[in-house]
Image (cartoon, rainbow, N blue to C red):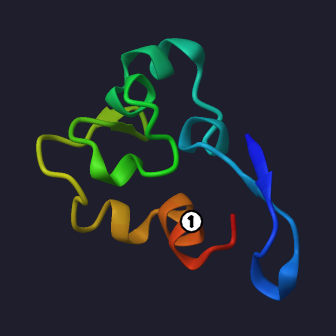
Amino acid sequence: MSEKSGGKNGKRIVMVNCWDFYHCPRERQLACPAFHQDAGRSCWSVSGTLCGGEATGVNTMMPGTCSVCDFYLQVRAGDM
């Protein structure tokens, strides 16, 4: 996690990785491609991530998965 300023209303926001946001156990982190690619802030761009403990498949930005994901929506909105 890291912090940055300039969020909504100039507040400091904590930059959280997806595996921290979802409290993934270490074994899930180690099995997830997003973790190995250091893509915890852009996991939707990585194929085969373990969203909810299940592999997402080969397509990135899975319709119905990422588009309704709380983490994705908050990152894209600049809330964290």
Q: Regarding mark 1 in the picture, which secondary structure is present there?
A: helix
- Pointer 1: residues within 10 angstroms few (<14), some, or many (20+)? some
Asked whether, in this view, residue 31 is left or right of residue 23, the answer is left
Tell me where residue 38 appears, x and y as whole percent: 46, 32
Q: Residue at x 80, y 52 (%)?
A: 3
Q: Position of residue 19 (x, y in %)?
A: 56, 35
Q: Residue at x 51, y 72 (%)?
A: 76
Q: Does residue 42 lie above or below 30 as drawn?
A: below
Residue 72 screen position, x and y as percent: 48, 63
Task: Report how many numbered discs are placed on residues in the image.
Answer: 1
- Direction right: furthest residue: 11
Q: Is 22 on the left or on the right of 30, as rendered? A: right
Residue at mark 1: 75
Q: Within the image, what quadrant is residue 12 found in?
A: bottom right
User: What residue is rendered at 37% in x and 29% in y?
Assistant: 37
Tell me the quadrant of the picture where the N terminus can be found.
top right
Residue 26: quarter of image: top right
- Quarter in which the C terminus is drawn: bottom right
Can you say whether 12 is above or below 43 in the image?
below
Observer-nearest of 7 and 75: 7
Where's residue 16, x and y in %? 67, 47
Furthest toward the bottom, the residue is: 9
Name the amino acid, label 1. Val
In the current view of this chain or complex, which residue is farthest to the left? 58
